[in-house]
Structure formats: structure tokens, C-alpha cells
Amino acid sequence: MKTAPTVVLNNGLAMPMLGLGVYMTSGDQANAAAEEAIAAGYRLIDTAAAYGNEVGVGSAVRSSGVSRAELFITTKLWIADYGYDEALRAVDQSLHNLKLDHIDLMLLHWPAPSGFDRTIAAYRALERMHEQGAIKATGVSNFTEAQLDHLDDAVGITPAVNQVELHPYFSQTSLVKANQRRGILTQAWSPIGGIYINHPADPNQVTEVLNDPGLVEIATHHARSPAQVVLRWHFQSGVATIPKSVNPERIRQNIDIFDFELSQKDMEAIGLLNRDARAGAHPDVFDLDFLTKLLQK
Ligand code: A2P
């Protein structure tokens, strides 16, 4: 059985360096994927209130036959639930959906900069739930360096994790270093660049990181898939990942990366693929107002 190595977060909690992502999957799909993943050795499942599939994930955890203590469940607080009391209620709702008595890592899903006081209040609510034992680690997602500083000035617990868009075409090296300086672990969402496929800027010209010729060449050399090479690149860079897949073969493939090593030359070559090409929303603009306007278009 292949399990991912763990990393010790800034509060002493051990977290697997690789887990399953379930973005854009229905409750049933997430349930099946999480069951498959746990059977394949995954010990971390990453969901979010906004994905609408916490129930499916929680059910897979309970039926897995693996003890709760061995599993690491991440979920995220949605921006509509920011504010102190709202966040307390939303964490309770996530616990209820998951039917678990604690969440291992709870993230603020986005910084929501236009109402940052509510973002701070939401983080304080996570701190309170942490004190009570309902959350084992508090963290953030999609925060820029400036937003981390803004938060840090106002709260007591440094986030354990900053989960951000990160793949070979958007390697965010300065943000990774900024996180490191603060003792915050970087966790990559869309680590193999699936965001380009799921949200293509131009549907007629979809960018596929995994088809990059440089990557394919390295993968061929190691007799691995491009996805395995990218996930290994993250791991050797000290970045945790949550590749999303609902396909049993790809779920197994994505965790099978801990028995080969990329050379320094491979690592540098993958680093050079960076195009600073963000595919997801920008954290300086993405908030509830932005979303509302987007939906009204
Ligand atoms: P599927 O769920 O059908 O496997 P990311 O996590 O970077 O956003 O990538 C997710 C996307 O990549 C999904 O569309 C997923 O599709 C696909 N995917 C996941 N694992 C692999 C893999 N090993 N090879 C190719 N595509 C993959």
C-alpha cells in the first residue's frame, strides 16, 4: 500500500504531502473517488463547503475501514459565510455535513478583499473552533503575501497552510518563499494544471500542461506519466498537492510517485516552464461582489 509521506505543520500536526481533490464533483462522485483513494493509500481528502460534496466525502471516511485518526480531512469556509457568527455556524454545518467530530484543516476559501474585516472575523471564528478542538489546524487559501500580512496583524494563529493555484505554468515561486518565511506550508490546488481544462480562457484552444513537450520528454525518460512527474516536482519542491481525479486508474497513478526521483536538471527544466499564467481567479478581485456581478452578466 502506497501512502504519502507527511509534513509537520507549524502547529505540530502531521499532514500528508499528497491528497485527493474533489473540486467540481457531485456528492456521489466525490464519495466514490474518496473511497477509491483511501483504498489506494490516500490519507488526505480535500473538499470545501462550496463544492457541495462534503456529505459524500464524510460518508467515504466513515465507511473506509481506516481509523479516523489516520485520515486527514480538509474543508473550506465559503466567502458568503464570512463574519464571526456566520463562520461559527458554517463550521458547524460542515461538521454536520461530514458527520465528523473534527476537521483536520479548515481553510478560508478566498481572501475576499473588499470586506476584509469579515474575512478576519471568520478566521477568528476558526481560531475559536480550534481552541475547542473541532478544528485541528487553521489555514487560508488563495492569499497573496500582502493579504497574509494583513491577516497576521489581526489574528493570533499563523495559518498552517496557504493553498493556492500552482502548477508548472504558474509556479508562484515568490509566494512559496513568502509562505516559507512565515512558517506556512504551500499546498497546490490544480497541481497538474487541470484548471486550464476546467475553465479554459478560450474553449477552442485549451492549454494542457500535461502535453507540454518538455514535460513529456522527462516523463518518457523516467517511464512515468507527465502527471506523475509534475506531482513529483511539487513534492521535491516541498509543495503539498491535492490532484483531483474521479478516475480509479488515475487516482492510483497520482499517489504512485514516491519511488522515483527527478534530477536537479529535471527540476530546473520544469521550473523553466513557468509562464506566470494564472488560470483561476485573482485573489485581489475575487469576492462576493465580483461573483454577483459575474453571475448577473
Ligand atoms: P479525471 O477526474 O477524469 O481524472 P487538477 O487537480 O490539476 O485540477 O487536475 C484535475 C484534472 O486532471 C481533471 O480533469 C482530471 O480528470 C485530470 N487528471 C487527474 N489525474 C490525471 C492524470 N494522472 N493524468 C491525466 N489527467 C489527470
Image (cartoon, rainbow, N blue to C red):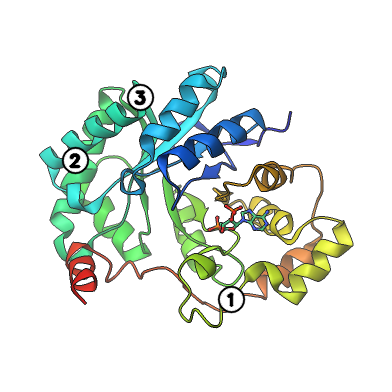
Instruction: Please name which of the two marks, 1 or 2, marks the residue nearer to the observer.
Output: 1
Residue 232, horizontal then vertical, whole percent: 70, 53
Residue placed under numbered mark 2 in the picture? 87
Q: Quadrant of residue 288?
A: bottom left
The front one of 148 and 97 is: 97
Residue placed under numbered mark 1 in the picture? 207
The front one of 207 and 235 is: 207
**Kind of residue indicated by mark 3:** His
- Tell me: is circle 1 under 8 Å from ligand 1: no
Q: Secondary structure at mark 1?
A: loop
How many residues crowd mark 1 within 10 Å: few (<14), some (14–19), many (20+)?
some
Q: Secondary structure at mark 2?
A: helix
Q: Quadrant of residue 131?
A: top left
Quadrant of the picture in which ligand 1 is shown: bottom right
The tag on residue 102 is: 3
Q: Secondary structure at mark 3?
A: loop
Task: Identify the image quadrant of the N terminus.
Answer: top right
The residue located at (53%, 82%) in the rendering is 204
190 sits to left or right of 58: right
Distance in Å between CA atoms under marks 2 and 3 = 15 Å
Q: Is residue 246 above or below residue 105?
A: below
Res. 285 in view: yes
**Kind of residue indicated by mark 1:** Thr
